[in-house]
Amino acid sequence: MTTIDKTSAVPAQRGDAHDSAPLLEVKDLHVEFHTREGVAKAVNGVSYSVDSGETLAVLGESGSGKSVSAQAIMGILDMPPGKIPHGEILFRGQDMLKMSSEERRKIRGRRIAMIFQDALSSLNPVLSVGYQLGEMFRVHLGMSRKEAKAKAIELMDRVKIPAARARVNDYPHQFSGGMRQRIMIAMALALEPDLIIADEPTTALDVTVQAQVMDLLAELQREENMGLILITHDLGVVADVADKIAVMYAGRIVETAPVHELYGRPAHPYTRGLLDSIPRLDQKGQELFAIKGLPPNLMKIPSGCAFNPRCLKAQDVCRTDVPLLHPVTEQDGTELPGRGSACHFWKETIHG
C-alpha cells in the first residue's frame, strides 16, 4: 500500500520531543452523563497506556465503561448529555482534550481509527462499499473517484475479500457478517493510522469467523506496527492476540496484567469470576459458574468497592473503603511488572 504522508495531521510528529512518550496514554479519565434521572458516572478515573505494536485488551461486562472510554478517546461522545469533568488523553504526548475540534478531526481517522461492533448499522445501506471506502481518500487526500475506487479495491484485497474488483460496487447487505467486518477493518486501515480501537469487532459472528477476523487484525497490526486497543467482554477472543489486559468494572479498572499472567493467576475476585465462567473441555457435564447479581446502576454505584455486593470475599472494609489499584507482588514482596489489583484482599485472591 502506498505510504501516506501524515505530517500535516497533528503538530507532534515522529522524531520530535514526544517520541519517548507512549503512543496513547489515558490518565485519570472521568466521563459522566447528565440525565433527568441523575448523573451516571460511566468512567471513574481510568488510566492505561498502549505503545506502537502493542495490543491492550479492555475487558468487562456490558456497562463497565469500556466503549465510553473509547468514544472519549475518539472524541465522538454526545456532549451533552456526556461530559468529561477530569482527565487527560495523551496522543504522542499531546493532550487531545485540550485540542480544538479542527485539531482532533485531523487525528481522528488519520492517526487514530475505530472499528465499530455492528458493521451493518455502521455502513450506509444505500451506498456501495467501494464508494464508502473510497470516501476516505476523496475527503482526506483529495483523490479523484477513479483513484479512490482503485484504492478501495486494494484495501478489499488486503483484508482478503474474495473477488474484490468484482464486488467493489456491491452493497453492505450483499456481504456476510464476517465480510462486512473485514470492510470495517479496511476502512479503519485506509489512512494507515498509528492506533486502532476495535470495539467488540467479533460481536454476532460465529466462532470460526471470529478467529478469522482476529487473525486478520493481528496480521495487519504486525505489518504496520500499529497500537491496538481491543474492547471486548469475551476473554476467549483476546487470549492469543493481547499483550496486556485491563479489566473494568463500574467505570474503574480493577485489574491490569500481562495476558498470560492474568489467565494463570488473577488477582481480583471479579477477574477470577470471569475466568471461572468460561466453559472448559475438561469439565463436561458440570454446571457453569456464574457471577451472582448484576453490574451496578451507574447512578447509584455502591459505596466502597463497587463489586462488593456480588463478591464472595467481601468483608466490612469492602463496603466502606474504595480500594486503590495496588501493585501486585509475589509472596516474597517482589513486584510483578505491569500487574495491579483494586482489591483489599488481592493477596488472598492471587496466592490463595
Image (cartoon, helix red, strand yellow):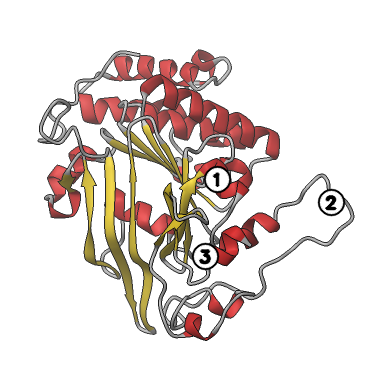
Q: Amino acid at mark 3?
A: Trp
Specify few, some or many for label 1: CA neighbours under 10 Å numbering under 14, 14-19, or 20 or more: some
Q: Nearer the viewer, residue 77 or 193?
A: 193
- In the picture of the structure, the residue carrying the numbered disc 2 is 283
Cα distance in 3D space between marks 2 and 3? 27 Å
SS for dot 3: helix
- In the picture of the structure, the residue carrying the numbered disc 1 is 261
Q: Residue at x 60, y 42 (%)?
A: 237
- In the picture of the structure, the residue carrying the numbered disc 3 is 346
Q: Which callout, 2 or 3, points to the residue nearer the camera?
A: 3
Q: Nearer the viewer, residue 146 or 98?
A: 98
Left or right, 144 with reference to 153: left
**Residue 322 x %, y %:** 40, 76
Q: Is residue 229 visible?
A: yes
Q: Amino acid at mark 2?
A: Gln
Location of residue 159 with respect to 95 vertically, above or below: above
SS for dot 2: loop
Location of residue 2 with respect to 254 vertically, above or below: above
Question: For the view shown, which residue lies furthest in the front direction?
Answer: 332
Q: Residue at x 65, y 33 (%)?
A: 209
Asked if labels 1 and 3 touch by Cβ distance under 8 angstroms, the answer is no
Q: State which tag comes first along the sequence, 2 or 3.
A: 2
**Residue 308 x %, y %:** 54, 78
Specify few, some or many for label 2: CA neighbours under 10 Å numbering under 14, 14-19, or 20 or more: few
Q: Nearer the viewer, residue 243 or 313?
A: 313
Q: Amino acid at mark 1?
A: Glu
Q: Residue at x 38, y 29 (%)?
A: 53
Please identify the quarter of the rendering in which residue 85 is found.
bottom left
Q: State which tag comes first along the sequence, 3 or 1.
A: 1
